[in-house]
Every structure is written in C-alpha cells, then in structure tokens.
Image (cartoon, helix red, strand yellow):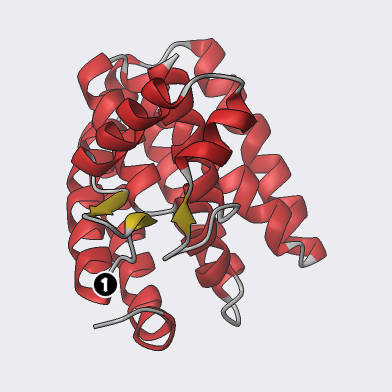
Amino acid sequence: MKDAIARQLRQDIASGTIAYGEKLSEARLAQRFGVSRMPVREALKELESAGFVTIEHRRGTFVKRLSRHEILDLFEVREAVEGMAARLCANRANNEIVALIDEVMVEMAAAAQAGDTDGYSATDERLHQLIVKGASNDRLTDHYRLLVHQLHRGLLSSIVTRREGRMERSLAEHRAIVLAIRAHDADAAERAMRAHVQQGRFELADEVSVKFAL
C-alpha cells in the first residue's frame, strides 16, 4: 500500500495536480486512500528520500519547490539517461516498438499542425517512454521514471511547448531521433537525443528564471 500511495502522489506532483509548496496532510491523505496514517507516513518518507517533498519538524510535509539550478542540473542528467536510451533503442528495438514509435510521430505531427500544445506534450511523453522501453534495460527505465517525476515533466513540457515555434522545432528534433533509430544508427540516435534535450534545457532556462526560484 505504501508503494501505491507514493506512486500516486509522485504522479500528482508531476502533473501539477498537487502544487509546488503545497502542504500534505497525513489525515486527508489517509482518508483519500482509505488507509491508516502509517502507510501514508511511510510513503511521505519515501518521497522525501526521492526529493519530492520536505518534512519539517512541527510544520508538516510540503511539496518541494525545485530551484532553477536544480531543474537545469536534472536536465543534464536527463541528457545522459535519454541519450543512452536512444542508443540502446537503436540497437535493440523490435519491429513492434518501431511501429508504435512511428504511430506516435504521426500523432505528434498532427498535434503540431493543429497547434494543440497539450496534445503535443502528451504524445511527446509517450514517444520518450517508447524509446526507453525499446532500450530494454530495467535499471535505465527506473532512472528515467525517477527523473520524469523529479522534473515534474508534464508541467515543464507544457511550459516549453508553449514557446513560439517550439512545437515545430521539437518535431524536427524528434524526427531526427526516430530516423536514426529506424536506421539502427546508435551513434546518431544518441547524438540526436542529446541535442534535443540540450535544446529543451536551453529554451526552458529563460522560462524557469521567471517561474522558479534561483
């Protein structure tokens, strides 16, 4: 039960359902999940260890506010993790994974053409998940999932995608990644993914300067 509670809370934080700085009440969470306070308390301790919340003596538990510096640092780690994922995917992905990647690319292109930023962000996330799945490395998958949650990826992706022209630039970057994966060119796939994450980090830097603490 503790793990299920922690997983759901991570998802809520990543999606923005639970806001930065929000206080988490053990009593309300216990009522929400239909459990005693003990598994809730254990789940919150797990989230504290993973960097999602801070537990302050006599004040309570709060969703951690990521600083601009922390966000940009995590993007550097993401570059390494997803670069390796793209490399491994190019070497290991089967026809089923490649076909699914192609389907998502079609959806991404349609969302970009329609100017649908929310739809684009959702398909963007699915594409990256498929590439990680195609890497067939459980430990890498674990690191990727933790990064996604720590970065509140849904919220940050939405912030970046709304920048003028970003969907079109992002679509071109993803096409380069997918072409390399289809060609089983591991070097090119890793380069393209690293370039994509670097560009996202660059475009995010200005936004987080305004929306997040230094």
From the viewer's perspective, is 22 left or right of 209? right
The image shows residue 161 at horizontal and vertical percentages of 57, 68
Q: Is residue 9 above or below residue 53?
A: above
The image shows residue 137 at horizontal and vertical percentages of 25, 16
Q: Going 53% across and 53% down the picture, which residue do you hit?
A: 154
The image shows residue 50 at horizontal and vertical percentages of 23, 40
The image shows residue 136 at horizontal and vertical percentages of 31, 14
Q: Going 44% across and 11% down the picture, which residue do you hit?
A: 94
**Occupied quadrant, residue 70:** bottom left
Instruction: Decide which of 165, 163 is in the foreground and name it.
Output: 163
- Residue 79 in view of the camera: yes
Instruction: Decide which of 200, 141 is in the foreground and name it.
Output: 141
Q: Residues within 10 Å of mark 1 (few under 14, many from 20)?
A: some
Residue at image mark 1: 67
Q: Going 33% across and 79% down the picture, which residue do you hit?
A: 205
Marks counted in the figure total 1
